[in-house]
Amino acid sequence: MTIKDIAKLCGVSISTVSRVLNDRPDVSEENRRKVLSVIQSSNYIPNNSARDLVKTKSDTIGLVVRGVSNPFYTDIIHAIEARITAHGFTMVMQQIGSGDDEVKCGAMMERDKRLQGIIFLGGRSDYTPAELAALNVPFVCCSYGNPYGTLLRDTYSSVSIADEEEAHRAVQTLYDHGHRRIAALISREDDRSISQLRYQGYMKALRENGLPLEEELVISTGSFDIQGAYKAVAEKLRQGVEFTAIFSIADNMAIGAMRALREAGRKVPKDCSVIAIDGLEVSEYIDPPLTTLCQPMEEMGQRSVDILLDMVQGKGHNRHEILPTTYRAGASVRKLH
Amino acid sequence: MTIKDIAKLCGVSISTVSRVLNDRPDVSEENRRKVLSVIQSSNYIPNNSARDLVKTKSDTIGLVVRGVSNPFYTDIIHAIEARITAHGFTMVMQQIGSGDDEVKCGAMMERDKRLQGIIFLGGRSDYTPAELAALNVPFVCCSYGNPYGTLLRDTYSSVSIADEEEAHRAVQTLYDHGHRRIAALISREDDRSISQLRYQGYMKALRENGLPLEEELVISTGSFDIQGAYKAVAEKLRQGVEFTAIFSIADNMAIGAMRALREAGRKVPKDCSVIAIDGLEVSEYIDPPLTTLCQPMEEMGQRSVDILLDMVQGKGHNRHEILPTTYRAGASVRKLH
């Protein structure tokens, strides 16, 4: 079905159809209704390529996702894609492993796809200005910031939660429930990622409550995945280390930990409480439902796009937003007497 | 760092650097080593835009994902993206709701982004040739076929599992474990989706084993999501319907069902067995681990890309691949005596 066919079917001129398609006022109401009804009942798809040809700039926004198949990202990716498309831009996505270099990936995409801007979903928190010199378009760090780096605040944008404070809040919750031997399930203590930030929140909560930091209570898995967490917690339990609660830096890792506890004959929350940060949907359905601090995933994605497109369209400058989490009580934390 | 800077650093001419970058033979080994080592130690990023400018065709492949935040898709999307990128093409992704029209979305992307081909991840199984006339590039249906439609087999490609047979196998497994009152947890009986196909496999297994099809044992949720499944099973249990096993068309829905059973005081598998199709990673970690038929997600994504790129590059024709699932025994199915 072409614009010609529609004109013929409606008994109007081609330019009338064109005026309707371009939402121009110089068309009678009757003709407008006629054309729209034929378009709706047919499979006509408006052709934007002619319009695209006169565009001098590309309309492409790059999304670099670091940490493949992190379930936490699914909803954020959808929110980002929907928002970019709603604003008439095109999203080009590339996923890289958690060991890969997202800046290099972004810089190559910028040149090859003529990007107008980049959203990094997950990445290192220690960028230096020199490393980012390769980027010539605005970019937003989504879900992380630059706490270990040396970027000037007005040279980049970020949308994230207050990782250290939220971790502190989670651990404080365990403390308030009477727990004193609290294990931390993390990726690494010093990887300059959100793992380290959340670990700092853990240490701060211990310190403030006068609890010692005990090395044997720190469970480093070296990754963010469910299987790694499962194995690391199973190993810790085999070593006979005693604790009454686990603070996990991610829901996914908590789910791995819960299986390890179960297989070691320890019931959650009777023998061990578990709390995490993220708020995956599935965490509400497992047994017991996981108590967790939910990140505002949709809002996080949307705010990242809004900040970026403001800059791309010359309407705004770099800025930083910290979004709050929501405490979702499951049944994985119990009060000790 | 530009090509000029590299030439200066190496003490060679710009054209020598260019020859190394383009992997041409007319460079001495010494100069090649020198240039490559400077490129590696610097942050030089090859500029492909000049090359792109002379390309007359776009290198863009569209991915239309239908059914937002289906966790089953995460690994497939990654496999598709990695494969497309590895072949030097660019993926443009759009996600749409399960009620939206993926063909229209694909057709609009085709025109706006000058796509060379499209992969549909999830979609209706009843396309007619007229509906697909809007598409002018090769496309592959990933994870579904056209069993309820009228497409000629050589006009489209597909990569999927044998949904009906696999569902049959799952239900037969329950039967072989002594179950006679087996509920089916589906989206709809007649939505012409994989839900209907798997439901047919369920009916076939009942029929072959001389079991009646009982309406009260069919739990239609109207969606594929975890919450819908949870609510539908909870409602069925409130009605006092008796069954000893559930066949769920998806892992996700089975996880929702397991929470409903638990809240109704019914233990899995003691009071009710559960089996599903998909093979999500998280299903192995829940309590009890879910027994499920695992789809080969990575392979499914890779095969879809290979078929599509063969066609895009003029090396192949439309074809159809059926991939086998793998039975993963959890602890959610028990033998009745």
Image (tube, coloured by chain):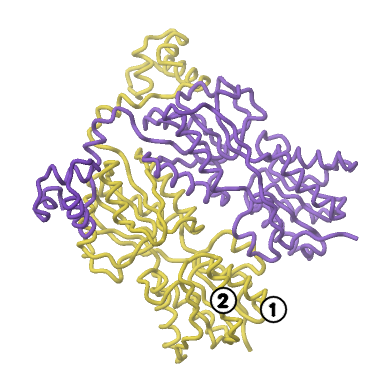
Chain colours: A yellow, B purple
* Residue B154 placement, left or right of A26: right
Pointer 2 residue: A233
Q: Chain of mark 1?
A: A
Q: Position of residue A38 (x, y in %)?
A: 49, 17
B49 in relation to A68, above or below = above
Pointer 1 residue: A265
Same subunit, labels 2 and 1: the answer reads: yes
Residue located 77% across and 43% down the image? B168
Q: Position of residue A178 (x, y in %)?
A: 57, 87
Give the residue type at disc 2.
Val
Q: Position of residue B53 (x, y in %)?
A: 24, 33
Residue located 32% across and 52% down the image? A105
Name the residue furthest front. Answer: B29
Q: In the structure shown, which secondary structural element does the residue marked by tag 2 occupy? A: helix
Q: In the structure shown, which secondary structural element does the residue marked by tag 1 occupy? A: loop
Q: Position of residue B139 (x, y in %)?
A: 50, 30
Q: Chain of mark 2?
A: A
Going from N to C along the chain, the mark reached first, 2 or 1, is 2
Give the residue type at disc 1.
Gly
